[in-house]
Amino acid sequence: MRAKLEVLNKKELDTIYGTALDILAKIGVSIEDGELVKLLKDNGCSVSEDNIVYFPESLIERCLKSTPNRKRTTRLCGRDPGNDMLIQNGQEYPYAISHVLMNYYDAMSSTYRGLTKEDIRRFVTLSDHLSSIDGIWMCTLMPEFDKMYTYCEYELAVRSTTKPVCVSSFEPGAIPPTYELAAALAGGEDELKKRPLTVAFCEISPLTWNIYGCNMLKATALWGIQPVITVETPMGDTGPATFAGNIAQKIAELLSGLVIVQLLKEGLSVFFVVPLEVFDMRTAQICLASRGDFVWACAVGQLEDYLGIPIISPISPDSKLLDMQEAYELSFSLLTRMLGGNKATVIHGLDQTHAINNELLLLMDEMLISARRILQGIDVNAETLAFDVLADVASKIENKRRSGHFLNQKHTLKWYTKEHLPRRDALIDKYSREKWIEKGSKSFIQRANEKVEEILKSHAPEPIPQEIEKKIREIHQKYRIPDLV
Amino acid sequence: MTKLEYAENWGTLMEKYITEVYKAVMSYDTEAVKSKVTEALDGGADPLRIMNEGLSRAIVEIGDLFGREEIFLVELMIAAEACMGGMEIAKKKLLEKKIPIAKPKGVIVIGTVKGDIHNIGKDIVKTLLETSGFEVHDLGVDQPAENFVNKAIEVDARLVASSALLTTTVSNQKEIEEKLKASGIRGRVKTIIGGAATTAEWSKEIGADFYAATATDGVTLIKRYFENTT
């Protein structure tokens, strides 16, 4: 990754981080769990009568040091170890994770509906097929799964992909069956420690770990699951409207979670998911793909490097249609993150994290390939400077005019694909208007829809091995979960 | 190897020569095409079979791959040039052996109109037609209308193809139509126009027979026309 946008200098980063430490030491974090308050107090925190916990800098430094993936490698895992995402310095390109959400937008009829299990199968199968998608994140909260949604989503996802699957959960009760299936897929509990299950949950801003968040912190520590601490501080709502202050608050909230995780289970890997929402004062809505998000996106890569902990940054268009607004929000959100050096993004579909769409996955695929190509930069060497080939082309003269071109040059054959990453099955239309009409005058969505069906007909994810199917039946029986397929 | 063994193995050897030439074109390896054709002919291979079953078969497949958008234009162009290089060597051998060369599929005059010096689209059409067995007379660029007409009369062409990329030069395509009519050969010569400044409407307005939006469309139209008339 060569191209990089930097919006904060070292002094500014130090100042923001120093403010975050001040927030933790002087403003403190509300912790709604007596056991965790005692744990923090026993480790040097002071506590007010209202269970506001004040974190000393020394404890934060100690816990950062005991976080094993800090400045090293963070691993997101799925069924096939060969597909694991290794988030680290020097990775070839920023990872992209597709996100399964609670509704499906049918682009052909322009209608929304509640997500079905078949929608999950199709969306995850597509994600499994697309080489630009590195993993899948699940958060459908489908009512039919009730409190076992974390497990159900996990099982449905791993059935359709061998890529890493992460889940979100607010229900500690669904952790045990999810853990058991993950252990079976990893080849046992010892293997699962090396290639852990990843579960995300959320702190509540401003500066509060409510009882649900506390329960999830304890559950992940108990099961040795890799926790993903998520903080949401909508600008002007539960966080300052200014970027510097909002980022400092985010860091404080994230570090409070990291400290609790390390005190509960020292040596547990942890990473962060951090959206930047802006409270839209015109509509009284929390918006995710606004100008504020684009600015934050430029800074997020610098912050994860500064902290040494990955910050997965969500891309969440607010548009309700696959229209120009969607394309604007998606492209600005994606490109700013990639140029800002963010190592991994999770891409929501549309409608403010409420819906997914298959055709959109194919647009993301095109955008990801372009964005990653930008990051590769420009190679300058004797071969790419092409002096000799230019001399050869220019030497062709007919009727006292230069008549050569590069279309028949081996140099073009070699470098056209390397430099431009063209796709033989490209969905982006580059035909003449006449040719486009001849091919049916189709919109991008129509072409993408045809491609989606073609992929789903031809791509079959690796089936779940028989011994895992047996384990799944045992889990269903043990936890009274109905069959999902 | 005895003469008998050589004779017995000849069929296999011939197949090997043809396959190697075919593979060299399919690999876009210009130098290998030349060396494999030379090696085959030096080994006594039939130049007509090398041309038809090695070179032409490969370029037809390459053309189909391009038509299905499975390869890029640069691959098609390099394969076509590689094929042409091999054809030249095989044709020389045919002349040496006084074996008649197959009649071209059609005789075509091509050029870029007066005032316009763009040649790439025209060159693509020319290369692809030549590798498909057409006799193409390329006038070059910046050519006045009378040159198209005179050349068509001289070589007894059945099709005149003109390219115009500038809106200021498209009127010269109309002039070609008028001069072809005036010369009395328009009835037996079809016309096709192309280039960035042209449209289907313009083609209709000036009375051209065909309009090609792209170079490869032009090749398809020309091939189709000659297939239907011979």
Image (cartoon, rainbow, N blue to C red):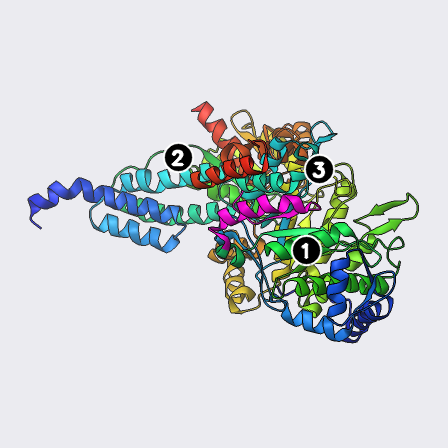
Front residue of this view, candidates A309 and A358: A309
Identify the residue under disc 3.
A102
Q: CA distance from mark 3 to mark 2?
A: 65 Å
Foreground mark, 1 or 2? 1
Query: In terms of sequence position, does the residue under pointer 3 or pointer 1 come before the other?
Result: 3
As drawn, A189 above or below B94: below
Callout 2 amino acid: Pro
Which quadrant of the view contains residue A405? bottom right
Q: Which element is circle 1 on?
A: helix
- As for residue A315 lying within the magenta part, the answer is no
Callout 1 amino acid: Lys
Front residue of this view, candidates A417 and A196: A196
- As for residue A168 lying within the magenta part, the answer is yes
User: Crowding at label 2, few (<14), some or many (≥20) Cα neighbours within 10 Å?
Assistant: few
Q: Kindly indicate whether the residues beneath marks 3 and 1 are on one polypeptide chain.
A: yes
Q: Are marks 3 and 2 in contact (CB under 8 Å)?
A: no
Identify the residue under disc 1.
A218
Q: How many numbered marks does the figure carry? A: 3
Point 79% across, 54% down: residue: A276
Identify the residue under disc 2.
B104
Foreground mark, 3 or 1? 1
